[in-house]
Amino acid sequence: MMLQTAGLSKNFGGLQAVAGVSLTVRERTVHSVIGPNGAGKTTLFNLITGSIKPASGTVKFLDQDVTHWLPNRLAEVGLVRTFQRTSIFRRLTAIENVALAIRSRRKLNYAIRMSRGEEQEIRDEAAALLRQVGLRDRENVTGGNLAHGYQRALDIAIGLALRPKLLLMDEPLAGMSRGDRQGIADLVLKLREELGLTLVVVEHDIGMVMRLSDVITVMQNGRVIAEGPPDAIRENPDVKRAYLHGSFAA
Ligand SMILES: Nc1ncnc2c1ncn2[C@@H]1O[C@H](COP(=O)(O)OP(=O)(O)OP(=O)(O)O)[C@@H](O)[C@H]1O
Ligand SMILES: [Mg+2]
């Protein structure tokens, strides 16, 4: 199994942000996690990717127990995330942003002198990744000057630079125009088809979630209230109820 959590829990004081979540993600699937604001989706991501520690429960990645591993170590074995807010360096160009991620994968930094050959190798790899996410023509634009949709694509290229097997994306479509959203959605499907990636996606755009996902897990108040393929989730009465006060226009 690609990813399996069992009884994963985290509380902030008296608040049960994630309460006994058992999630199973199969290889080569697009698996979405949805739920109203405050449901615990980002906290679940933080637990899986090691940026916070669970109060209880376990995380298994490719059948290895990785509970309590730190983010860098998880990235080394192929478990990588993108953030709800972008993690790009605004003053570096797109290609410099990706090159930095490649160097971090190779554990090189600016203090270490690199041969020209190595520099060129990294640049070529960065350029190839930018091509893959549709940023070929924007290599030399600084992160801060990229349009929002392109910043999200750059985020994805940075994630890909770490050579993930599983990529977790927190709201990759947030704040994007309709057209840009479709572009990122197409990219997600392309990554699964062409690279065989497994993707876990937190997203509020329910229409897009329905179109993209093989499996949808619905959270509310830190718990899983439903799980299944898009058609079943669309008709699920508990899900409809959970979204009563929000928008569930699928
Ligand atoms: N560091 C923290 N300290 C205290 N409470 C927190 C912390 N992080 C999250 N919470 C609380 O935990 C609950 C779950 O938050 P979380 O960010 O996981 O929700 P979410 O499902 O990602 O919401 P959204 O859709 O708005 O991003 C919320 O009530 C939130 O206020
Ligand atoms: Mg969130």
Image (cartoon, helix red, strand yellow):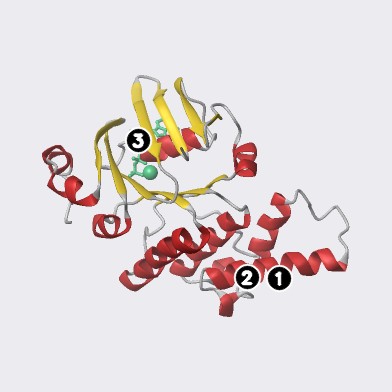
Q: How much space separates mark 3 and mark 2, taking CA atoms?
A: 35 Å
Q: Write down the residue under mark 3.
A: 40
Compare marks 3 and 2 and give the one earlier in the sequence. Answer: 3
User: Is ligand 1 within 8 Å of the beta carbon of the residue shown at mark 3?
Assistant: yes
Q: Quadrant of residue 145?
A: bottom right
Observer-nearest residue: 87 or 230?
A: 230
Question: Can residue 93 be seen by looking at this rendering?
Answer: no
Q: Is residue 158 left or right of residue 25?
A: right
Q: How much space separates mark 1 and mark 2, taking CA atoms?
A: 6 Å
Q: Is residue 37 left or right of residue 238?
A: right
Mark 1 and mark 2 residues within 8 Å of each other at the beta carbon: yes
Q: Write down the residue under mark 1.
A: 124
Q: Amino acid at mark 2?
A: Ala
Q: Is residue 219 left or right of residue 65?
A: left
Above or below, 180 relative to 163 = below
Residue located 62% across and 52% down the image: 162
Residue located 69% across and 57% down the image: 102
Above or below, 22 relative to 75 = above
Q: Write down the residue under mark 2.
A: 128
Mark 3 and mark 2 residues within 8 Å of each other at the beta carbon: no
x and y percent of residue 114 in the render? 86, 60
Compare marks 1 and 3 and give the one earlier in the sequence. Answer: 3
Q: Amino acid at mark 1?
A: Asp
x and y percent of residue 178 in the render? 31, 70
Disc 1 crowd rating (10 Å Cα; few below 14, some 14-19, many 20+) is some
